[in-house]
Image: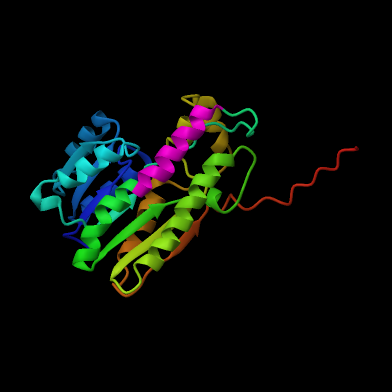
Amino acid sequence: MSGKTIFITGASSGFGAACASIFAADGNRLVLTARRIDPLLKLQKELAPHADIHIIPLDVRDREAVQGAVEGLPERFRTIDILINNAGLALGLEPAHQVNLDDWDTMVDTNIKGVMYCTRFILPGMVERNRGHIVNISSTAGAWPYPGGNVYGGTKAFVTQFSRNLRCDLLGTRVRVSCIQPGMAETEFSKVRFKGDDDKAADVYQGTEPLTAEDIAETVRWVTSQPPHVNVNTLELMSIDQAWGPFAINRQQK
């Protein structure tokens, strides 16, 4: 697949940067967005020999900023073939009765509203052209709960259900929607979750071989390279070192 215009959120690191690299190598045009401009500039420089790249410093939580970014795209980037809603984060592992409410707000605004805003402003063009593909990055946390996952898991469950409902809305068009649900993957994710505590972040992956950002990027490329009549609805993947936990039962004496 080459010659496509691909809009990637959260492209400064992790899954987003890996997707940018893999799609750039295939000769596509890329619109890369993230809050941090310096990593975007570095990525643009690295990938420029392979692809035409437009970068936008963007906070997907800001609805007006998202609208302005989409409407202000240079002419050659306006026909977006693939939207990769990747921007997202987890903050903290505290139980619900101890959590910092600001962390909950940030996760809801980024993981839910960011996906909503980018989809709403890019999707009309896809429907008008009767082609396109939206890829939403969810998580196994959206289907399988764990202690401290509370609002993060809830936001990713939204992403999964939102993807399914988009498919219903788009039935009769040639616009595809896919939801990718990665499990444990070693990126900046845990460092962000633990607010820069490298030791806590490293402990998450201790003694395991987790998924990599490149694994997820290869998955996204496979999903988007299927024939136009094939829609991969939902794809869940984990490291071989991860599985689901047993039922939790409290046997404490009353």
The residue at the point 46 percent across, 37 percent down is 107
Q: Is residue 139 visible?
A: no
The residue at the point 29 percent across, 30 percent down is 36
Q: Is residue 171 visible?
A: yes
Quarter of the image with the C terminus is top right
Q: Relative to residue 5, is residue 146 depicted above or below?
A: above
Which residues are drawn in magenta?
100-116
* Outermost residue, right side: 253
Q: Position of residue 188 (x, y in %)?
A: 42, 35
Most frequent secondary structure within the magenta stretch:
helix
Q: Relative to residue 200, is residue 124 depicted above or below?
A: below
Q: Looking at the image, which is closer to me, 111 or 5?
A: 111
Q: Looking at the image, which is closer to me, 2 or 124?
A: 124
Residue 22 shown left or right of residue 166 in the figure = left
The residue at the point 32 percent across, 46 percent down is 117
Q: Is residue 195 magenta?
A: no
